[in-house]
């Protein structure tokens, strides 16, 4: 039964956007895990914990995005190979110091923020307010996390110079 009350061909467009977001979030999640393990530098303890908080948050959101795709009668991507193919975020393989890692995560956030705005626009066009509401909440939460990371980065830079 089509309980959504929106034509499936319209929901497919939203599902495509959500799948790109799911793929990008999954690569971002793995970047955070790798950074949590490999962090070096004088701010090890602060940032080691901060990355753990961020990946725990991302884990919940990844599940919510996949289940939203199912809710709108579409199919979520489930393979790492497909995630890497569709992600707008690149895997970070290099070992970096704390400042560089925070900059990389901030750039990952910028990509996710843009992608969320695109998803909201698409969902809004087809009248899928449930997706607009969910991704809108994710968007403001990620914007706030970016503000905190950016404040840390600026403060650390001032202290180092
Ligand atoms: Fe850990």
Image: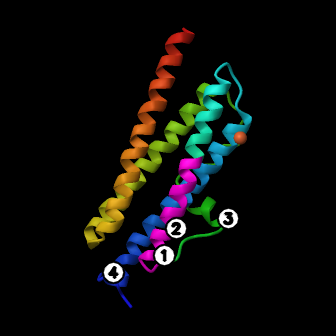
Task: Give the CA separation, mark 4 to mark 1.
Answer: 12 Å
- Residue at the spot 56% in from the left edge and 62% down from the top edge: 86
The N terminus sits in image quarter: bottom left
Q: Is mark 1 within 8 Å of ligand 1?
A: no
66 vs 79, left or right, is left
Task: Give the CA separation, mark 3 to mark 2.
Answer: 16 Å
Task: Give the CA separation, mark 1 to mark 3.
Answer: 20 Å
Is 66 located above or below residue 98 in the figure?
Answer: below
Q: Which mark is residue 124?
A: none
Which residue does the numbered mark 1 point to in the structure image? 70
Residue 60 sits inside the magenta stretch: yes
Q: Which mark is residue 66?
A: 2
Q: Earlier in the sequence, mark 1 or mark 3?
A: 1
Q: Secondary structure at mark 2?
A: helix
The C terminus sits in image quarter: top right
Give the magenta-colored segment's residue range.
56-74
Residue 33 sits inside the magenta stretch: no
Expressed as whole percent of the image width and height from the top left, the position of residue 87 reads 55, 57
Proximity of marks 1 and 2: CB atoms separated by less than 8 Å: yes
Q: Earlier in the sequence, mark 3 or mark 2?
A: 2
Proximity of marks 1 and 3: CB atoms separated by less than 8 Å: no
Q: Which mark is residue 4?
A: 4
Expressed as whole percent of the image width and height from the top left, the position of residue 144 reads 40, 38
Q: Earlier in the sequence, mark 4 or mark 2?
A: 4
Which residue does the numbered mark 3 point to in the structure image? 81
- Residue at the spot 48% in from the left edge and 75% down from the top edge: 70
Task: Give the CA separation, mark 3 to mark 4.
Answer: 31 Å
């Amino acid at each position: 039964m089509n309980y959504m009350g929106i034509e499936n061909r319209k929901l497919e467009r939203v599902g495509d956007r959500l799948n790109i977001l799911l793929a990008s979030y999954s690569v971002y999640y793995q970047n955070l895990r790798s950074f949590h393990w490999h962090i070096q530098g004088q701010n090890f303890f602060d940032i080691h914990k901060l990355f753990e908080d961020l990946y725990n948050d991302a884990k919940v959101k990844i599940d919510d995005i996949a289940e939203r795709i199912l809710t709108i009668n579409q199919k979520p991507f489930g393979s790492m190979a497909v995630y890497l193919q569709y992600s707008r975020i690149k895997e970070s393989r290099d070992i970096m110091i704390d400042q560089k890692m925070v900059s990389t995560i901030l750039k990952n956030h910028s990509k996710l923020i843009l992608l969320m705005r695109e998803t909201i626009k698409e969902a809004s066009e087809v009248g899928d307010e449930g997706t607009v509401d969910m991704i809108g909440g994710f968007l403001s939460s990620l914007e706030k996390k970016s503000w905190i990371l950016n404040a840390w980065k600026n403060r650390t830079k001032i202290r180092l110079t």
